[in-house]
Amino acid sequence: MSLAGRQLSSLNVLIAEIAEQNAFYSAKLDQADGKNGFESLENFSTRMPFTTKKELAEDHANNPPYGSNLSYPVSQYTRLHQTSGTSGRPLPWLDTPEGWQWVLDNWKAIWQECGAKAGECAAFPFSFGPFLGFWVAFEAGVQIGLRCVPLGGQSSLERLKMIERYQPKWLCCTPTYALHLITVAEREGIDLSSTSVECLIVGGEPGGSVPEVRQRIESGLGNARLFDHHGMTEVGPVTYSDKEDGNLLRILHDAYFCEIIDPETGQAVAEGEVGELVLTALGRAGSPLLRYRTGDLVKAKSLPGEDPLAFALEGGILGRADDMLIVRGVNLYPSAVDAVVRSIDGIGEYQVQIETKESMTEVSLTIECVSGDNSKRISQDLQKRLREVFSLRIPVTMVETGTLPQFEMKAKRWKILK
C-alpha cells in the first residue's frame, strides 16, 4: 500500500474511534462532514478545519483541568504531561496506556533509525519534569534494550563525573545543554576528547540541524555523532536526522500526516518555501490532534526515489512563526542568529535583546566569552559577522561568564525589552 493509502487508512480508523465520544472533535468533524471518514487526504485537508493552540487553551480554560479533547473517561488515562509553556500557559496532556505505547513506539523508531542497539548505554542529563520530552526517550530506550542512566538532580560537574564513571555511548539532551556541558568540562579541566559518548540525540529547541551548532557540539565531545530530533508534548516524537545528511530531518510519516502552510493564508506552500508545519497524529486516539498548527517554521525537501509525500525538513526547525522578527526589512530567525553566534569560537551563553525605539525595532546581543584573553576580539568578530550575514548593525555587549541564565531544557534567549 502507498504511503498515502496507509495514512488515509490510519486517519479513518482514528476518526471512527473518536467521532462520537470526543466532545472537542465531534463538533469539528460535524462541521467538516467527516464523522464517517474522508475519501482522500486532499479531501481531509480541504474540509477539516485547523486546530490551534489558542483553541486548546480556551477549551482547557472552559473545561478544567484537562479540556474536552478526551475520547474516553478520565479514569482510563494513566499518564499526564504538559506542554513547555513557551507560547503561554502550559497545557496538561493525558494518555491512555495504548496512546502512551504509540508515543513510545515512535521514539523506539527514532532510536533504531539513529543506530542504537540493545545492550548499549544511554545517559540522560536532565531533571525529569512534567513535559513529555525525555520521559518518552528514556522509556523507549528501556524497551529496545538500552541501559538507561538518569542524571537528574545533580550539578553539571556531577553529571560529567557520572558520564566518566558509567561510560555511556549515547547522550540525550538539548543542544544548549550539550554546549554547556562542554563549557563546564573546559572550565574544570575535564578532557572530553576521549569521552565514551559516540552519539547524541538532541531536541527540545532548534540547533541540532544548524551546521555551526552541530559542529561545535561534535568537536567538543571528541567527534561524537549528533542526531537532531523534534517533537511536541501534544503530538509526540516526530522527526530524526537523516543518516547521510545532517541538515535534513526525516519525518515518521506513517505516524503523522504532515502539511506545510503559509502562516498568513493557511494555504499549502510550494516545496522549498518556508511555511508552518501542520500535523495530524494518526494513532493517539485518547487525546487526538487533527490538522494541528504547530507554529514551527520548516521547509520541505523531496527525497530522490522516495514517495513525494515522504518529504524531509531541510535545515530542521527553522524557528517559530511567532518568533520571527523583521528588522528594517530583514527576517531574523532564532536558528539563523544561533548559527552566526556558534560560528565564532570562544562564545558561551548569549542573549538577544529586542527593543522598539521611535517605532523602530532594534536588536542587540549580550555574550559571555569563555576565552577571557581574546574577549574583545571575539566581540568584534561577532559584530562583524552579524553585519555580513544580515546586512544589519547589531551591537554586541560582553559580560562576565555566569551572568546570563543557563538552560537545561529549552533555551529562552530572546528577550523583549519594554
Image (tube, rainbow, N blue to C red):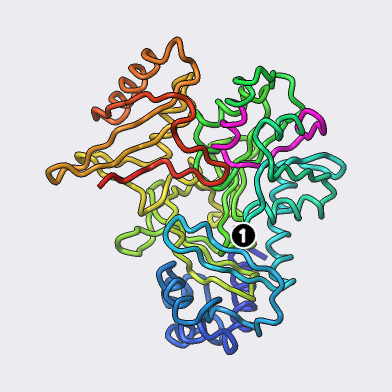
- Magenta stretch holds residue 3: no
Label 1 residue SS: loop
Depth check: 318 or 179 in front? 179
Q: Is residue 335 above or below residue 418?
A: above
Where's residue 418, x and y in %?
Answer: 25, 47
Q: Nearer the viewer, residue 371 or 96?
A: 371
Magenta segment, which residues? 163-182
Q: Position of residue 34 (x, y in %)?
A: 50, 84
Q: Position of residue 158 (x, y in %)?
A: 71, 33
Q: Please state, as top left, top right, bottom left or bottom right, where the N terminus lies in the image.
A: bottom right
Number of on-image labels? 1
Which residue is at a point 82% across and 43% down the rendered structure image? 117
Q: Residue furthest top?
A: 373
**Is 105 left or right of 242, judged from the image as shown?**
right
- Residue 114 location, x and y as percent? 70, 42
Q: Which of the two residues, 109 or 372, is positioned nearer the viewer here?
A: 372
x 24%, y 42%: residue: 355
Residue nearest the viewer, comparing 113 with 416: 416
- Crowd band around label 1 with a 10 angstrom C-alpha radius: few (<14), some (14–19), many (20+): some
Q: Badge 1 is on which residue?
A: 130
Q: Is residue 46 above or below residue 144?
A: below
Q: Quadrant of residue 378?
A: top left
Please, what is the dominant secondary structure of the magenta stretch?
helix
Residue at 42% x, 47% y is 319
Is residue 179 highlighted in magenta? yes
Q: Is residue 163 left or right of residue 236?
A: right
Type of amino acid at the residue the image marks with label 1: Pro
